[in-house]
Image: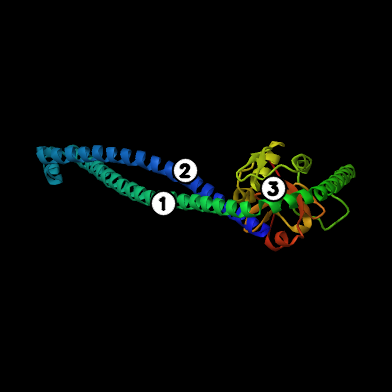
Amino acid sequence: MEAQILQLDSGLERARTAFESATFKLTGIQHNLKINRIGLHVARANLVVAQKTLAQRLVSIYTGRDNQTTLAVLLGATSIDDLVNRIESVQSVSAQDVAVVKQVVGFKHEVTVRQHALVRERKAQTALVQERAQARNRISYQLGKQQRLYSSIKGEIARLVAAQHARQLALARQAQQRYAAYQAQQAGNLAVGGLGTDPSYTTPPSSPYTGVIAIAMQYLGVPYVWGGESPSGFDCSGFVAYVYAQVGVSLPHYTGAQWNAGVPVSQGDLQPGDLVFFDGLGHVGLYIGGGEFIHAPHTGDVVKIDSLSEAWYAATYDGARRITGG
């Protein structure tokens, strides 16, 4: 049952990631639509002006006796100097006419391009709105399914949580002792000007945010609430985002974006404060050292410590990311 609830929560997190991603893309498309509408309006206005200029020029050429043909201009010359001047005038007028025609053609092309872009963006907008609606529907469906499952085993979960309380207290004490030893070791490394005794250590850069673990430990026992991001209740990504916010780092409240916020780190190089991900980015927690992590697991549970070696987490482990800058 717990595995089913974990999978449902992971599915909810992935659905929210899809919803937030579609929302972000939709904002960009709406901005592009606005820019293209303005551009189309300007291009149409420019085309009207250019067409009027061309029409006036054509009327001038047709009605002006001295400008009907190049031959008429040349034959009307009264001297060699006048002929040279007339030739230069004809060339100048011809260049102006070519420029006017090019303007009309250019603006007509821009109008066509803008119209096609608007059609594409409106189609993309429609598709994204449908994608968001589908993601929202998946969230609603999975929330209902999860709630029904949880209601059927709520009493058993409460008994198990109570039984785990003493174990969690012991794990917390061990983790705090381990964290204190880790901090002392890091201070010693800095004092001697090195990264440690392992000469093979090259990647990734050390985490500047190991202090988030002491903050995270304060919220052991806080109940899981889907969508929660405060000490009254957390979900997995809300817990990570809230803890990092306490050290001045803003992380999005969904796992997909949190995965992209850091640099990759191998499981063998994990440090306290690294983000660990599971089940196709459906779940996230904070590594605390010793092969353990702290997280908000699922509906009916509380913020607690678990091991990366536990069956479900070991089987669904995706990888880790290190936050290296605010």
Does dot 2 land on a helix, a strand or a loop? Answer: helix
Q: Quadrant of the N terminus?
A: bottom right
Q: Residue at x 22, y 37 (%)?
A: 53
**Residue type at the position of mark 2:** Thr
**Separation (CA) of disc 1 from disc 3:** 36 Å
Nearest to the observer: residue 258 or residue 305: 305
Q: Residue at x 63, y 48 (%)?
A: 258
**Residue type at the position of mark 1:** Ala
Colour treatment of the image: rainbow
Camera-nearest label, 2 or 3: 3
Q: Residues within 10 Å of mark 2 (few under 14, many from 20)?
A: few
Does dot 3 land on a helix, a strand or a loop? Answer: loop
Image coordinates of residue 179 in percent, x first then y, are 84, 45
- In the displayed structure, does residue 97 sit left or right of residue 265? left
Q: Which residue is mark 3?
A: 296
**Separation (CA) of disc 2 from disc 1:** 12 Å
Q: Which residue is mark 1?
A: 124
Q: Which residue is mark 2?
A: 27
